[in-house]
Image (cartoon, helix red, strand yellow):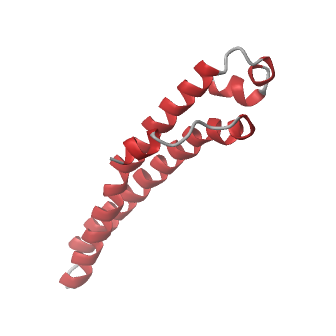
Amino acid sequence: MLRACLKSRPPPSRGNHSSLINIPFRTIKDHHSYAKETKQLEDKLEALKAQEGADSHDIKKMGEQVAETAQMLPNVKTRIETAMDDLEGFLGSNQENEELAASEDWKAAE
């Protein structure tokens, strides 16, 4: 459903091509951050479980944190796919624009 909402938005205007090109890069960074955070929280949870006398409430809350962070990974993956589709569409529909094709953003996107 989120993908359908994002797909139905109007095409980007010529003025915001730079942000459209940078969206996939930022979203990939978000994915890496969530993956790293998930791993760190899982390690903390395992250490907490290994502690003698660890409070069951603390373990439960840490488990919830791990689950919430891990749930973001599929969402961010969908956002990456959508951003890449948008970028590919933008690049395809603007190949004839020499000004855009000469920009550094365009070269980075290809």
User: In the image, residue 56 lies at what x, y percent?
Assistant: 18, 82
Above or below residue 98? Residue 51 is below
User: In the image, residue 32 lies at what x, y percent?
Assistant: 47, 47
For residue 77, side relative to residue 101 (left or right): left
For residue 27, side relative to residue 99 (left or right): left
User: In the image, residue 37 lies at what x, y percent?
Assistant: 42, 59
Identify the residue at horizontal 48%, vertical 30% (top origin): 85
Identify the residue at horizontal 46%, vertical 44% (top origin): 6
Residue 92 sits in quarter: top right
Identify the residue at horizontal 25%, vertical 69% (top origin): 63
Above or below residue 41? Residue 33 is above
Q: Nearer the viewer, residue 5 or 56?
A: 5
Above or below residue 107? Residue 28 is below
Above or below residue 26? Residue 70 is below
Q: Nearer the viewer, residue 108 or 10?
A: 10
User: In the image, residue 88 lies at what x, y percent?
Assistant: 54, 25
Q: Nearer the viewer, residue 14 or 67?
A: 14
For residue 20, side relative to residue 37 (left or right): right
Quarter of the image where the C terminus is located: top right
For residue 77, side relative to residue 62 (left or right): right
Q: Nearer the viewer, residue 74 or 92?
A: 92
Count of numbered badges drawn on the protein: 0
Residue 42 sits in quarter: bottom left
